[in-house]
Amino acid sequence: MNLLDIRNLSIVLKSATNPILAVDRVSLTMKEGEVRGLVGESGSGKSLLAQAIIGVLDDKWQVDADRFHWRGNDLMRLSLDERKAIISKDVAMIFQEPMACLDPTMTIGEQLAEAVDCDQLSGYFWQKKQQRKTNAIGLLHKVGIKQHEVCLKKYPHQLNDALCQRVMIAMALAKRPILLIADEPTAAMESTNQGQIFRLLASLNQLKNMSILLISHDLENVTHWTNTITVMYSGQFVEAGTTKQIFEQPFHPYTRALVDSSPKANMNLPSKSRLMALPGSIPILQHLPIGCRLGPRCPKAQQACVVAPKVSNSHGHQYSCHFSLKGSY
C-alpha cells in the first residue's frame, strides 16, 4: 500500500471572470521509506502541489482530485479541517528560506521547545518545561548541531543559512513525521552547505525510514539523493520513474532537455562549450498554452499537441507525450 496516493489532482486559482487551472491532473505516489524527487523549472507548480498536500493553500485556491489517499484514508471525503488534522500529525515541510520561517524575536531554544509535541510531555508544568529543553537538545543533536548550548541561545539572524535550515529540519522532526517534504531546502546555499543538508536528509531516511519528497529545479542535484523522480512542467505531469530511468533514458523531450542542460551529462564537451537549453521560458498563469503546455518550446511539437496527451506506462516508467523518445534508445 502506498503511503501517499494522489491521482489527477488539479488546483484552480478562483476568479469571477476567468478561473486559472494552475495544476492540471497531476498524479503522485510515495511509498514508505522512499525518497522521491519532484523536479521542474521555477513556476512548474511543484510548491503549489506540496502546499495542497499539507493543506495550507488559502481560499483563493480550489483543490480537486480523483484520488487523494493518505495511508489508505480517503482525504477527499473529509472537510479541510479534518484533512489538515490527519496530515499535520504525519507530514512535515521545510521551506527554501529558513530565515523567513523562523521567528526573529525568539531564540532558537524557545522555538524548538515550542515545537515539541505536547503528547511527548508529562508531569507538572516545570517538569514539562525541562522536558521541552531536553527534547530540543536531542533534536539539535539529531541534525548534527553538537554545540547545543550556544545554538539554543542564538536568534535566527545570528546563524548562517545552513544552520537555520538544520534548525528547521529539527523543528520538523519534533513532530516525528512519516513524510518530510523539503521544498528547495538548499536554495541560495554554497555547494558545501548544500551537501551537508542533503547528507542529513539521506541519513534521516536511512536511520528512521522516513519518506522524503525532495523538491528542486536542479535535476542533476536530485539524482544523487533520490530513488525515484517525478517531473512537472507548467502545472502538468511530464514523466516519472526511477532515478536511473529519468536521467539515463528520459522519454519526454522536456526531461531530455533538463538532462542535456546538466554538466554531468556534458562531461565530454570541449572547454567553454555552451550547454543545451530549451528556447523561451515557462509560461505565466495568465497565458497558458492549450493542450501540452510545453508545445511552444518543444522541438518535437506537432499539431496533435494542442490536445493534452494521456499518461503512458512502460514497465513503471510513466510519461505524458504524443511524440515520446521511447523508441530512440
Image: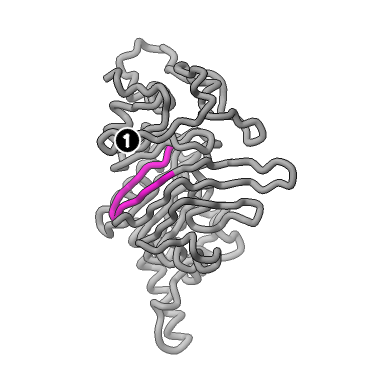
Residue 126 percent across, percent down from the top left: 46, 85
Residue 153 seen in render: no
Residue 328 seen in render: yes
253 w.r.t. 316: above or below: above
Seen as rendered, the residue at the extreme right is 17
Query: How many discs mark residues in the rendered view?
Result: 1
| Three-letter amino acid code of the residue under disc 1 | Asn
Which residues make up the magenta segment? 27-39
Q: Element type at marker 1?
A: strand
Residue depicted at x 25% and y 36%: 315
Residue depicted at x 54% and y 57%: 156
Which residue is more in the foreground, 61 or 147?
61
Residue 67 percent across, percent down from the top left: 43, 53
Residue assigned mark 1: 313
Q: Is residue 107 magenta?
A: no
307 w.r.t. 28: above or below: above
Residue depicted at x 50% and y 31%: 308
